[in-house]
Image: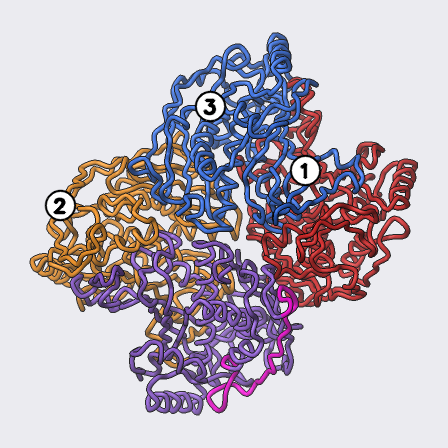
Chain colours: A orange, B purple, C red, D blue
């Protein structure tokens, strides 16, 4: 479905970096959910470039809810959110010149030159503003059901944040952090690494780790609609995400079964697991433990260094050098994209499992 | 769509471990493709347990093409492949006792006790026989278009195979290998590790690395139907896969943009990339370089060691101890699952992009 | 999705008329539903050609439930039903010769000669055996929820059956009728018309009228997933159905709004409608009144009369004359196809609205 | 997918009658198609109420293409079209009172009172403005491939227009007609019937007949993605459409096979049919003849006559009397909705069959 994902709850994304604007349509959300515009603004703020570690391009991100909300509540019909573009400098992007690491060349292969070349067009990270606004509504809906999502930068430039510990406290702490790292000293050192890369005209990548608490067991499907399948499908839809792992993830390659299995215990008529190596999912289905997964965000492709490339207008080999503004890191901002698609996938899974009204507790 | 995936080319999986059999329906494949039953048998053989490093359960895997093939060619209508079950020992699986690491508990949460408990029922790796038979047809179809898929064990128990080198030669070599490792000495040491785990009643995991050559550029979509999204969706549908990464994958967290971007070069009117850090995909779309990705397979959950667990029939805490046959490793066999879903996803992507007849060169 | 339909509950159909067999996979049905094999047999019997008004080809229709049923109940995982082919006479169908009214020519256009030509191949009405077996399970599931489907021949050769009157009684009466007509005298006259056509080597069409009682209100969607959209999608999937209308249907073209609207009345805190011109659906959503719709079944294309046609092997104009067995009417048998797809669509709609367990009352 | 339909080319609809506006997202259309804003305006004009036979509410229907079009051509990425609402009189619609024939009651059942009640909210015919704007782009794309769609009022209040005759000329004639009837005298009499109904405070329905020329053969699927299935799915998504028939449609109930089959003829190496009783479709697949189908539009539900109804706020029985503006007929305006969804479905079918670039002749 190209720019749409989901089954019962769907998201459709549209827009370009330097066109009229970007937007999203969420369909299938239950009626009667509170739409908190302040929380949408909060989430958009987390997405926005911040201070020295980000691009100087600052958009006001004024969103407009076009449909699907009446008297502050979802109506149950499609919610369209529009965010107009401002502060556009198209001159930064000469046509024909491929920026390595970007989608310029693949867009040419696919769209034969008809793509909007300005600022990455439809491939621009700008569209994540619409994703985040839409995701904020899904995050709020989950919170009304005591389901919480928290994401921190687990690794950046070889530096590692401490693992999740007290989940409730950690998730709450992360909620408002612009640079979501649990260990303050590591946060500082990570930002120093970003600034060092920026001084070199370069950029860095990083790994995000996400936890979801409060999800009921029995959600998801064996085989192709496993929770892992649906989440990874959406997570890999975020530009720059190049890896997704659940629980111990790639660490499983160095483990034995006796270390990888999660033992169970029955207490007061309820079953829980003693460990969470499998990230809350067995056989594609939630087991009642917190979801735990990591996504890796590749280094921002735009850098201020000469790169060997091709001018597709002339088919000449040329050195590409970006002059415009850019982000030396987006991993801290990508956190909110991850939370957004996670929330949308979970709303979808819950609606498929328990019906369209479930999330609204109707 | 639960047990179905794909858009234009779809796969539907059905069956249980100890029921009448397992099967698959592939729909949307072009008419006129040669169906090579010997190659299906070959692929099923690669999937079968082999020697000391695998379970003693040996099925003959006699498949039957029920529909969609006429005079040795695909008709263009749904292909159903059935594989009856044999050699079934249901006594090994007492009802109510949860095997840690398996889907026993989550199946109970989802199916309320109505699931077939024998040998994991619908969650059994047995269904991969149907997946492999279906995948073999897709792999053949791609080969007719000079698109080749090769997978090796990249890592197992801390041991690393050499990376891909001469892709054409390596992919060809891997085609017939029961234990797909490029460096023979590493292969031996990996098998020793598996045997050592088996002696301890334990199991090991591992990482598979896959390359696809010959894929045209311009295939896939920005955002939610990125090649990464569709492949990971299908790969995470394979039981035991808990991580998927493309190109440098999680290594991107320790890289800078100048190391992560792939420079381009124009030669004789054609563009290629000088490196392949992004695994052949930019902005979700193929760039003409080989696809490169890795999937991690968690250690087989069944082990011959006592594990703390719960009997759901009584809700008592009990020590679980598997007596039946089991695999100390499935990563070498999982290779053919990875190849199969990869082939099916690629057939789907090509059909979406170039039409339903494309793969048959009609 | 080609041979699959549905969202939360899906049906996949496969097979050919003269191949190994036909089959269906139903996925997404709740666990714990009783699977009544006698009722499946009963429905297959209604589908089978009967006496002088039908084709002499008689299959035993021995079905086999391959998966998804355990100890007589659905497991919640895919149910595959297989029906092997028997009594096959391929000689009746010379290759290349187009039978007017059949899909022979369009199959050639689409499948380029690779289609199975024997007996219509995948286009054969034979596949409806699998559809009916699958539908029987869905019909049973609905009945457990007091939702009943009844279909009669409303019109055949200018003869009209009486309209539905006492719905409960009428639906029950129709359940076991091989020739489902409410007015016995009309039934006799309709059969005379069929025999008269048969004597002329000809065939007849007819209109089926279906009622569904017990469906809750609030099911379906505005716009593109209206109950009308989903039902018609499935109904037009039945070969020979060429028209579908809801409520007054095409009669609305001769009505005024004051005649077409259904007035409402509140009684004891419940709302009902005083008439049912709109067939139980307003704005795409069920209104609590019985669903009412009609489907037209075109005359069986196979006739024993010379027809101008083309031999695609030679591209010569030739007179086509069918020698094989054929049905002078299938409208009475098509009734059970209509009931089957209706039941599957309703199970899907209910699962989407109220969750996957709803139909099983879990 | 609720408010989205299509597979390779999709349409998503959003908005409410008295909210900020309505809009549509078309995804999957080929890049490089000319977007003719004048033609969009032309189509919107055909949709607008006209003169005495329509509602006095007149919107300027100023649309804005938000995304997916660059330098007058489609980019290949999602096209969002927005149409802001103006001229809104919400006072006409008291909350709680059900208007018979509308979706007021079913919306309450589904959305529990959270739906936007103003002017029908998301159920309003106002959303068809977005549908028409989107459809115009699809219609243009088909025209570039010499595929033309034409629709006339076949029947209204017992009056019948002449059948299609010279298809090319008829389709061209209809293109600009506000009241699309081929026989001028019938057109006058139909309009008299509409005015007569209006004087009685009443409304009328009618039947639309559509022809599509130039479609290649071999498009569509057997079984559930038949051309009939996909078209009817979309057509029944249009509010007020309550019946769809192909070729002879319900007339087949009174025909014999020898009258219903279309004979074939080979001429100069090409096959054509001598008649078109089956509306250009056999076995769900196009046969190269023009598509021919009819849709019935029920009488506009809003009338100026007292109707028995219920006030859902009080659950009292009350007489409902609409005071606001209304259309005594929408069948002439619905023509452009039919053309729009038809074009979108055909673009989707062609993209599925021949690839995403086909329609752009790239």
Residue B326's x, y, as percent? Answer: 51, 83
Relative to the observer, which residue lies in front, C20 or A167?
Answer: C20
In three-dimensional space, the C-alpha distance between marks 1 and 3, rounded to whole angstroms, equals 45 Å
B284 or C32, nearer to the observer: B284
Verify whether residue D53 appears in magenta.
no
- Label 2 vs label 1, nearer the camera: 1
Q: In the picture, residue A291 is in which quadrant?
A: bottom left
Q: Residues within 10 Å of mark 3 (few under 14, many from 20)?
A: many
Residue C356 relative to residue C213: left or right = left
On the image, the x and y values in percent for residue A118 come to 23, 43
Q: Secondary structure at mark 2?
A: loop
Q: Is residue D129 above or below residue A110?
A: above
Residue B170: horizontal and vertical position, in percent? Answer: 35, 80
The residue that label 1 is drawn on is D276
Q: Chain of mark 2?
A: A
Instruction: Answer whether residue B239 is visible to the viewer in this image.
Output: no
Residue A247 is at least partly visible in this image:
yes
Q: Which residues are magenta?
A: B46-71
Mark 1, Cα crowd under 10 Å, few <14 / some 14-19 / many 20+, is some
Task: Name the disc covering residue D29, or none.
Answer: none
The residue mark sitting in front, 1 or 3, is 1
Tell me the chain of label 1: D
Regarding mark 3 in the picture, which secondary structure is present there?
Answer: helix
- Quadrant of the image occupied by residue A12: top left
- Decide: is D70 above or below D98: below
Disc 2 marks which residue?
A56
Residue for badge 3: D118
Give x and y (percent) for residue C257. 64, 19
On what subunit does the disc labeled 3 rest?
D
Report how far apart the C-alphas of labels 2 and 1 lie in the structure: 65 Å
Q: Find out whether the residues at labels 2 and 1 contact each other: C-beta distance under 8 Å.
A: no
């Amino acid at each position: 479905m190209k720019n749409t994902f989901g089954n019962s709850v769907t998201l459709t994304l549209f827009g370009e970096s330097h066109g009229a604007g970007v937007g999203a349509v969420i369909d299938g959300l239950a009626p009667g959910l509170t739409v908190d515009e302040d929380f949408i603004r909060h989430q958009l703020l987390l997405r926005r470039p911040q201070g020295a570690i980000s691009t100087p391009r600052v958009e006001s991100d004024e969103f407009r809810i076009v449909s699907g909300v009446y008297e502050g509540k979802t109506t149950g019909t499609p919610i369209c959110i529009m965010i107009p573009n401002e502060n556009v400098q198209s001159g930064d992007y000469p046509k024909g010149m491929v920026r390595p690491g970007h989608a310029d060349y693949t867009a040419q292969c696919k769209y034969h030159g008809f793509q909007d070349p300005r600022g990455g067009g439809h491939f621009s990270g700008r569209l994540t503003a619409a994703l985040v606004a839409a995701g904020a509504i899904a995050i709020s809906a989950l919170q009304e059901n005591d389901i919480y999502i928290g994401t921190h930068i687990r690794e950046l430039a070889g530096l590692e944040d401490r693992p999740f510990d007290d989940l409730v406290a950690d998730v709450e702490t992360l909620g408002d952090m612009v640079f979501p790292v649990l260990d303050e000293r590591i946060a500082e050192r990570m930002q120093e690494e970003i600034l060092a890369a920026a001084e070199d005209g370069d950029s860095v990548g990083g790994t995000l780790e996400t936890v979801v608490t409060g999800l009921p067991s029995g959600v998801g499907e064996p085989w192709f609609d496993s929770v892992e399948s649906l989440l990874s499908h959406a997570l890999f839809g975020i530009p720059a995400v190049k890896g997704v792992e659940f629980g111990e993830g790639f660490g499983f390659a160095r483990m034995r079964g006796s270390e990888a299995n999660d033992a169970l215990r029955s207490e007061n008529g309820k079953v829980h697991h003693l460990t969470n190596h499998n990230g809350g999912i067995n056989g594609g289905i939630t087991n009642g433990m917190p979801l735990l997964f990591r996504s890796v965000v590749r280094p921002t492709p735009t850098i201020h260094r000469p790169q060997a490339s091709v001018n597709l207008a002339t088919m000449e080999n040329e050195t590409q050098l970006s002059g415009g503004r850019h982000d030396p890191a987006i991993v801290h901002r990508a956190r909110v994209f991850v939370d957004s698609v996670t929330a949308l996938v979970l709303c979808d899974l819950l609606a498929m499992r328990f019906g369209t009204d479930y999330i609204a507790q109707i």
